[in-house]
Amino acid sequence: MDSSSEHSEKPPHAGTVVVSASDVDVAAQLASSNVNLDPEVAAKLRHLVSLSLVEAMTFADKTTLGQAAILGIIPGAHLNQNEFNWLGSIFYFSYLAFEYPQNLALQRFPVGKWMSINIFVWSIALMAHAACKSFGALFAVRFILGICEGAITPGFMIVTAMFYTREEQNKRVGYWFLMNGFAVIFLGFVAFGVLHTKTHNFMPWQWLMTITGLITFVTSILFWFFFPDSPTTAYFLTVEERILAVERIKVNQAGTENKHWKRSQFISTITDRKIWLLTAFAAFSFLIVQRQLIVKMFGFNPIQTTLLGCVDGVVEILTIWAGVSLASYKPIGRAYAGVIMFIPAILGCILVNTLPSHNKVGLLFSYWLTIFAITPFAISVGWLSSLTAGHTRRTTANAMYLIAYGLGNAVGPFIWKAKYQPRNHVPWAIMTVCSVVSALLLVALRFVYAAENKRRQTATEKDGYDEFYIKTIQADGTMVEKRIGREFLDLTDLENKEFRYVL
């Protein structure tokens, strides 16, 4: 029997139908129509989940390269400016090349375990930087880092969608993005410390890579044992709490996960214009990976630059916290909160480009304003999980979004060419335009999804996914048919007419 006969791509319509367990959500086995979830119990369960989910320093690799530049990696590894730019870009070229395979692996294998394997390899590659003395060697380890990074952000997106309601996902994604800011602060102090470390034939940038690599190695071990794969198997939940955790997220109309890749969901995603609008936004939301070098060009020495880099982290933490808080306020929502956060970023880009070179303090504060541009991306990552349903569709949308993000970040370093230094007027002009375009794309997304919600609210069409059952085997060996609701049929947001898009 071929696979198409064993696994239907889409549950059949009409009446009482028994469907294969592989076609529905994995949580369908735990779902129960007899459970009444008390709001107080739900709040306690959410608190337990939040305490148990480990928040790792997932973005340390993005900032180590910039810090390493201040600590002497360019002369130490015999690099020129173009080669250094390539080290920033190759990370994202490998990231975008392996993003979809990584998302397929996240669907096929236990999420937490797959992430921990990637973090482990990542830690070895990070420590291997210290042994590299040429562009070719650094190119190789940066390529490996990009491959591993492809599992981290989508992994967190998937797990967040499994454990939290769509209303909660915005803040939760924002909170793990805050770890980027803490990583920047931590690395700033590490960089300051290693600058004062005098060792024979071991430069400060090599110490930085070794220390961060060791920390990442420990993180990978913790992930393997403590990071959950799904609410249906989470070690910190009892069997009863797992049932309640599944019950709590029914309102998402999106289930938790399905290990069966569905071609129909893949096609519906890559042909969806709304998803392409999101990917366009991601492509324009590239980061500045040479942040410390830019600050140094304002006229600060290496020690001042490393300490000022800690302020970057503080600004990032505060802006992301403010942004996700605004996004949680319903009259504003995700899109408008992103636009609001772009306003100071655009102002900062303009000021950096127009203030005189001798105004170091003004340039520095203007640069800190540009960090606001990170927040809309953090908001959009949480928003994406609230705009898609159907596990194959969600992982495909995640991959498309992050591939576009990787493409933007791969191209981004090449706008910071040596010929534009030290003021970098052309790069900052490009950053200004990209921020304006990104803000307009957010407004367009809000309009499109609001229009779809309004159409669904007034439509009379029915989807017919009400009376479905799966066969379950009891402890005594008897087989019973268990009714499941539409939220565990692994329907996409396009198929489920009860699905409403979060704005």
Image: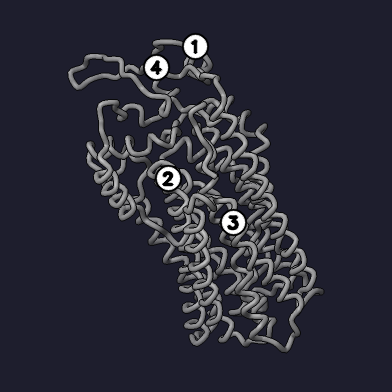
Cα distance between the residues tagged 4 and 3: 40 Å
- First in residue order: circle 1 vs circle 4: 1
Position of residue 297 in the picture relative to residue 207 (left or right) = right
Q: Are marks 3 and 2 in contact (CB under 8 Å)?
A: no
What residue is shown with label 2? 159
Helix, strand or loop for disc 4: strand
Mark 1 or 4: in front is 4
Q: Which residue is mark 1?
A: 1
Q: Position of residue 299 (x, y in %)?
A: 68, 86
Mark 1 surroundings within 10 Å by alpha-carbon count, few (fewer than 14), some (14 through 19), many (20 or more): few
- Side of 345 relative to 353 (left or right): left
Q: Residue at x 39, y 16 (%)?
A: 467
In this rendering, the answer to whether 45 lies above or below 24 is below
Which of discs 4 and 3 lies nearer the camera? The answer is 3
Residue identified by numbered label 3: 338
Q: Position of residue 412 (x, y in %)?
A: 71, 61
* Nearer-the-camera pick, 461 or 142: 461
CB within 8 Å, label 1 to label 4 = no
- Residues at marks 1 and 2, CA–CA distance in whole angstroms: 34 Å
On the image, the x and y values in percent for residue 8 come to 50, 17
Residue 223: x %, y % from top left: 37, 53
Provide the residue designation for mark 4: 468
- Identify residue type, mark 1: Met
Q: Nearer the viewer, mark 1 or mark 2?
A: 2
Q: Can residue 123 be seen in this snapshot?
A: no
Q: Earlier in the sequence, mark 1 or mark 3?
A: 1
* Between 393 and 303, the one nearer to me in the picture: 393
Q: Earlier in the sequence, mark 3 or mark 2?
A: 2
Q: Is residue 435 above or below residue 107?
A: below
Q: In whole angstroms, how far apart are the C-alphas of marks 1 and 4?
A: 24 Å
Q: Is residue 134 above or below residue 7?
A: below
